[in-house]
Amino acid sequence: MSVLSALLARAFDDDPLSLYLFGGPRTRATGLARFFAIQLRHTYLRHGEVWTTPDCAGAALWAPPTMPRPGAMDLVRILPVVPYLSVWGRKTADVLHLLAAYERARPRQEHWYLGTLGTDPDRQGHGVGSSLLRIVLDRLDADGLPAYLESSKERNLAFYARHGFEVTGEITTPRGPTLWLMWREPRPPDRDAQR
Ligand SMILES: CC(C)(COP(=O)(O)OP(=O)(O)OC[C@H]1O[C@@H](n2cnc3c(N)ncnc32)[C@H](O)[C@@H]1OP(=O)(O)O)[C@@H](O)C(=O)NCCC(=O)NCCS
């Protein structure tokens, strides 16, 4: 698990949301690794699905429709990450606004939620992310279930669009990053067969 949290910390090191929430490079690296370790242990390995490659080049963390929404215990579990955050002063209200908007935007319709997808930076661009995504997306297509994600990197929008996601909204913060909300309807099996 520490291998996966370390790889996700590297993948998200230059992410606009990471840069916004965490302090300098060292603080960010440790904070992100702790955050992903907590997410893996308490959320995705317990209630969801975690997919990786045999050499742990990337990871996809999925939440099924049945997974409980974050509650008070999740806030308590995240406390070890707090010392690494840089969200104090004027920024606190913006971050709270962002968190509330993020939760409000989550579709009520039943869906699988892609919480995190990351490929180790030196392995990016070689199909790892696509192959990890397809494992679950192919199954969702077969089961007729939609998927949802938020992306804080504009560069990823084309990547996700190629996998059938469409931008359905945006969350902006006054001095922070934009989050793009993306929804994917299941593709009928015959459409896949034509590709
Ligand atoms: C987005 C991400 C998971 C894609 O994984 P990947 O293993 O590079 O994906 P693939 O090799 O299957 O596909 C690469 C495609 O993603 C796009 N891409 C996005 N960010 C990229 C990056 N940093 N390096 C290479 N390609 C990137 C490229 O446009 C590329 O498209 P192409 O196939 O037309 O060249 C990966 O770039 C990553 O971990 N990024 C940082 C973390 C992140 O932003 N995760 C998504 C959170 S919503």
Image (cartoon, grey):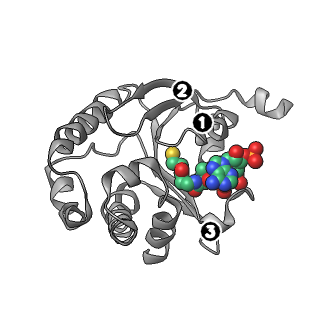
- x and y percentages locating residue 129 in the rendered image: 64, 54
The quadrant where residue 59 appears: bottom right
Viewer-proximal residue among 91 and 43: 91
Residue located 22% across and 60% down the image: 78
The residue that disc 3 covers is 57
Element under label 1?
helix
The residue that disc 1 covers is 157
- x and y percentages locating residue 190 in the rendered image: 78, 27
Q: Cβ–Cβ below 8 Å for labels 1 and 2?
A: yes
For the residue marked with disc 3, what is the amino acid?
Ala
Q: Earlier in the sequence, mark 1 or mark 3?
A: 3
Up-down relation of residue 13 to residue 141 (above or below): below
- x and y percentages locating residue 163 in the rendered image: 67, 37
Up-down relation of residue 180 to residue 40 (above or below): above
As drawn, the label of residue 167 is 2
Left or right of residue 60, residue 175 in this image: left
The quadrant where residue 95 appears: top left
Quadrant location, the N terminus: bottom left
Confirm or reject: label 3 Cβ below 8 Å from ligand 1: yes
Find the distance from the CA under tag 1 to the CA under tag 2: 8 Å
Up-down relation of residue 3 to residue 22 (above or below): below
Confirm or reject: label 1 Cβ below 8 Å from ligand 1: no
Q: Residue furthest right?
A: 194
As drawn, the label of residue 141 is none
Regarding residue 135, the answer to whether it shows in the image is no
Residues packed near mark 1 inside 10 Å, few (<14), some (14 to 19) or many (20 plus): some
Q: Earlier in the sequence, mark 1 or mark 2?
A: 1
Regarding residue 69, the answer to whether it shows in the image is yes
